[in-house]
Image: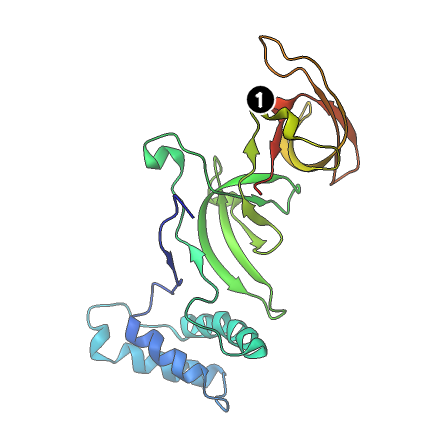
Amino acid sequence: MDGLRPRQRLVFSGFTKAEIEKMEKLLEEPEQPLNKEFFQKVARSFSCSSGRAGKPIVKWTEVQSWFEHRKPELQCKDSYGRGSEDDFLLPEPIASNEAKGKSSELEFEARSSKDGAWYDVDLFLSQRVLTSGEAEVQVRFVGFGAEEDEWVNLRTAVRERSIPLEPSECQNVKVGDLVCCFQERRDQAIYYDAHVMDIQRRTHDIRGCRCLFLIQYDHDGTEERVRLRRICRRPK
């Protein structure tokens, strides 16, 4: 997709490439007991190796965390056949407009589990695969700090960014369309999914589109008449 950097596999930065390759091989051994003694043995072998000279020693809990992260992913791949090197890939962190030094639209938005609203994604931080086989990504939202980072479902809660409509595009909005609508309330103003229920077409003037759109918010079923400026369309 235009504007995105090359995609990469995420790795644990605390381990060397050789150590990760060694653990990958150990993980594929079917009879390998993944217990405390095993993790301690692997940690000691890494800490004593010449490749770790000048680096911090490896804690057995760090090895345990790596295996616990990778085991569900491997099980998920096995259930559908061995995955390729392109499985479970994410875009590299997407720079914000400020970091890019120029104005440009962001590429993704994610739905927060806290309020069900959609927010622009600033960074993809990490990924994981649950024992259920569902993939999740950790995101940072534009304008929020690390304390607001969230793990969200990759399939259902991450998508291409909704696109604001120009006045000349109002004729493209039809009854029944799924849109992302800016809900303005006394205590908040955020974007929610909604469906267009009715449209009152009006003649445009110098101020732009004067049409009224009756929308129904998906998260709570409430209805509201809004102007075009509050509606974003979904990319086709």
211 versus 109 height, above or below: above
Left or right of residue 90, residue 167 in this image? right
173 versus 90 height, above or below: above
Give the class, few, some or many, for how many residues have Cα within 10 Å of label 1's Cα (few <14, many ≥20). few
Q: Between residue 57 and residue 182, name the one nearer to us.
A: 182
Where does residue 167 sit, x and y in percent of width and height?
Answer: 58, 21
| Residue found at x 60% / y 32% | 232
107 versus 181 height, above or below: below
Where does residue 137 sit, x and y in percent of width and height?
Answer: 52, 56
Left or right of residue 204, residue 222 in this image? right
In this view of the protein, can residue 188 be seen by the observer? no
In this view of the protein, can residue 66 be seen by the observer? yes
| Residue found at x 56% / y 39% | 119
Q: Name the residue under label 1.
A: 168
**As drawn, which residue projects farthest toward the top?**
206
Q: In which quarter of the image is residue 27?
A: bottom left
Left or right of residue 1, residue 212 in this image? right
| Residue found at x 47% / y 67% | 87
Where does residue 120 sit, x and y in percent of width and height?
Answer: 52, 39
Amino acid found under the numbered disc labelled 1: Ser
Where does residue 121 sit, x and y in percent of width and height?
Answer: 49, 43
| Residue found at x 57% / y 76% | 80
166 versus 202 height, above or below: below
**As drawn, which residue projects farthest toward the bottom?**
31
Q: Quadrant of the C terminus?
A: top right
